[in-house]
Amino acid sequence: MTADAAALDILLAVLLVFLVWRLLTLSDLFKATILFIVFGLLLSLAWVRLRAPDVALAEAAIGSGVTGALVLDALRRLGAHGAVDEARPLRLNLARLSGGLLVACLGAILLWSVLSLPAGWRGLSAEAMAAMPHSGVTNPVTASLLNFRSHDTLLEIAVLMLAVLGVWTLDAEPKPSAEPAGPILDLLVRILLPLMVVVAGYLLWAGGHAPGGAFQGAAVLAAGGILLHLARPFYLGNHVIIRLVIGFGFAVFLAIGVMLVVGGGRFLEFPSRHAGTLILVVEAAATISIALILLALFVGNVREGAGRDAP
Amino acid sequence: MTTAAWMEALLAAPLAGAVIALISGRRAAALVGVVTAFATAAASIALAFAVSRSGVLRYAVGGWGRPLGIDLYVDGLAAVMVAITGVVGACISVCAAGYFAPKPTHADLPSDKHDRAWLYWPLWLMLWGGMNALYLSADLFNIYVTQELIGLSGIGLIALAGGSAISAALRYLLLALAGSLLYIVGVELLYAGYATLDLQQLRDRIDANPSTFAAAALMTAGLLAKSALFPLHFWLPPAHGHAPVPVSAALSALVIKTGFYLVVRLWLHVLPGLAWAHLATLLGVLGAAAVFWGGVQALMQERLKMMVAYSTVAQVGYLFMLFPVASVPEALPGALLLAASHAAAKAALFMCAGSVLAVYGHDRIRSINGIGTRMPLTAVAFALSGISLIGLPPSGGFAGKWLLISAAFAAGAWWWAAIIVLGGLLSAVYLLRALAFAFLEPPIAGFGRAPWGMEATSLVLAFIAVGLNFAARPLSELLNAGAG
Amino acid sequence: MAVLDWLSMALVGAGTLFFIAGSIGLLRLPDVMTRLHALTKADNVGLGLIVLGLSLQTSGPMEVVRLLLVWALALLTSSCACYLVAHATLQARRETGHDS
């Protein structure tokens, strides 16, 4: 590693720790939220430095973008009272001191065990590279997520679905009085939204051979939806079409897995010849569902009329 | 059908049911849910028979095989846990079909919540699918994902009750996230050290170095928090006490056991190479503390559901007394039998509490007089499941405790046996206190109509808890099926 | 080639200077409007200069187009964001009577 690369890494690491400290101790929650978004962006830079561009994309889009928008929106709904956390800045007391000591011990244990690991570690990359020709794609990350460890990804999509179900179980909020944001934002949306759809499609397609894939594409698509929602507020409810689209990605993935069993193979065993196509189908379906899931999380559970859920 | 086919069915059926229930919505969700529940329960029992007939099986999902892919693995232990989940899960589904029916009949489910009651079905089937996937998985990271599935669906299910259940659900969310974080850090360390996530391969490669100890400690701490072992039980009573009845039953009877199962898997099957006698003693001591603390707290509760919830804190304690005596062959079947009978008895007790809530409109222990004459089915179910929880013969609780006590004597550690007996006495005190109010006082003019579905299901579960008295031998045989 | 490299460096350096000026302005100027002024002007021109500088280093016209697109998008979003912030500030001023 060259000296300037090392300097960049050290600067990043110091900045990340500093940001976390600031955002945990600031009493102004709005400022803390902005720092959280900045933290997400710097963290995605750190992923780039670790040569994990797929993770960096996901971090920037979901960790910083969509999550940041969610936190900002939550802050807005809390109103003026919620913007300042009375319990901050943190004063030292016995509980915090013992908590801090516990975390320090944990950190020490982690440091110690990481330092005791063997040098020159390769993990399973050799095995993964050897299996790549049969995976149907050329991007090893996509091969891992959608073929080698597709079972994990299937369940992860279910977890995302559960998040929306969880939001639906909560009491619906009355519709906030939102006015359209004006002609400039409308114009921005009109230009950006088609671009974002194209970018999402590109990311989905690129996932097969380059950094990208369903999660990243879906995050961009959801960001487009959020932008639209900010310009012209709309509400989703849990209408049958919404439920269908939310369940679609998981249903397609599971159905393909089961059909492969019916066809005489094992669960989720993509035949090498069709693996590329099947992965693209699964990813396309998942992109649509995940995008709507993320958007539904942002839009939240809003009551249309009095005492009833959205139709 | 073969073992592999039953495993595929157990993974896919509840998940498919969940997504179909989600899409079909209010009108058909319950129907889809009950059908899926019975199919899954049948597959669970079939899997147990298949394993006892043809032994353990390893199944490479996606055909890649470890260490690159994810393997499923079923042995006697996994088959027993899946079967417990299947049988109790089917009973809970029957109870839920009545409880979450369109008409508001239950005091603890506000009427404006009935619009959303159907969400129970996708959430519950996801929870079930997650538990099956957890028991059948042989991959540490895959197990992490299944825990997320279980945790998140559990939170949604608790939140269905609304009101004060929301804060309990959020506390459970934070706890589950903290536990998962500890677990996943441990998994990363093991993967970094041994370049595999497969349980069997880890067992073969493990050696006693600092990173392995740290990983084992972190994972165990996370799992203990999820299985609510004293002193990490604080989140359990509010969550289980405020959730809707079928949800309390599922969480207390089944979900808690996933953490216990993983600790067993980890220490008995993956890390037996580490010298862990001190940790085993610590787990036993925490278990003993849980038995007493949970018992005393249960005794002090005013509400029936909260008493039943604190009783779970105590019952979890017995399970962890397995570890100090785990070298004795009777110990594991004993603990599993205890887990099975607790699952049945605890689900039954929560349903009894639910029936009382429905009829009386409250569950204050002091004012439930006359249950014995007004609701004989519920009273009998309460008494029978109480017998199993206390550990009186004949019951699954008795047979399980008997095996654990024999194991304690065989290991030359009589004090564990003494704690088990004393804990039984303590649970007798709090359960009989509630029963005394139910039987001895004269009946008063009643209020609600008895939910017959819930009453009948609780009785069935109570009979199962008692009948497990005779399950010790088949259970031991299943555990030894194809072992080696 | 060397001339191109020098030109690139000069352009990128000038762009960086604009960024620095914008950042100092953001920190030192008294209220929202003047800060916005410093920030957006500096960002747009600074980024434009950097894009120009980098365009001299590309291997083909497609890359130049991509760089220009990045600049165009940044221009679009930053000017819209500028408008939105200014609009919100004006509204806040009208409501509270002073700059917030």
Image (spheres, coloured by chain):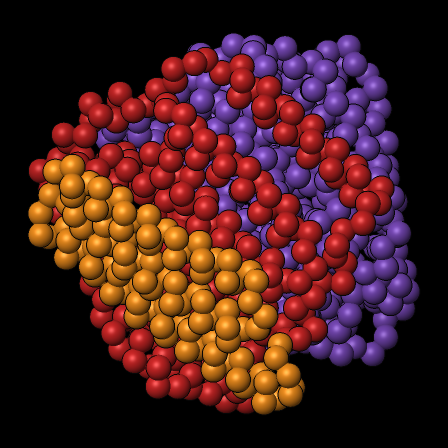
Query: Where does the C terminus of chain A fall, quadrant-wise?
Result: bottom left
Residue C63 in picture, x, y percent from top left: 14, 50
Residue A302 in picture, x, y percent from top left: 50, 78
A229 above or below B318? below
Say whether residue B350 is left or right of residue B268.
Answer: right
Residue beneath the point at 76% across and 63% down? A86
Say whether residue B421 is left or right of residue A220.
Answer: right
Q: Nearer the viewer, residue B435 or B6?
A: B6
Q: Is residue C50 visible?
A: yes
Residue C91 in picture, x, y percent from top left: 54, 86
A80 above or below B417? below
Say whether residue A44 is left or right of residue B396.
Answer: left
Q: Nearer the viewer, residue C66 or B253?
A: C66
Say which quarter of the image contains residue A195. Answer: bottom left
Q: Which chain is purple?
A: B
Say which quarter of the image contains residue A198. Answer: bottom left
Say which quarter of the image contains residue B75. Answer: top left
Query: Where does the N terminus of chain A fall, quadrant-wise?
Result: top left
Residue beneath the point at 50% across and 37% down? A11
Say whether residue B83 is left or right of residue B381.
Answer: left
Count of all numbered marks drawn on residues in the image: 0
Residue A259 in picture, x, y percent from top left: 20, 47
Residue beneath the point at 48% across and 57% down? C23
Q: Nearer the viewer, residue B211 or A61?
A: A61
**Which colour denotes chain C?**
orange
Q: Is residue A161 visible?
A: no
**Which colour denotes chain A?**
red
Residue beneath the point at 72% across and 33% down? A102
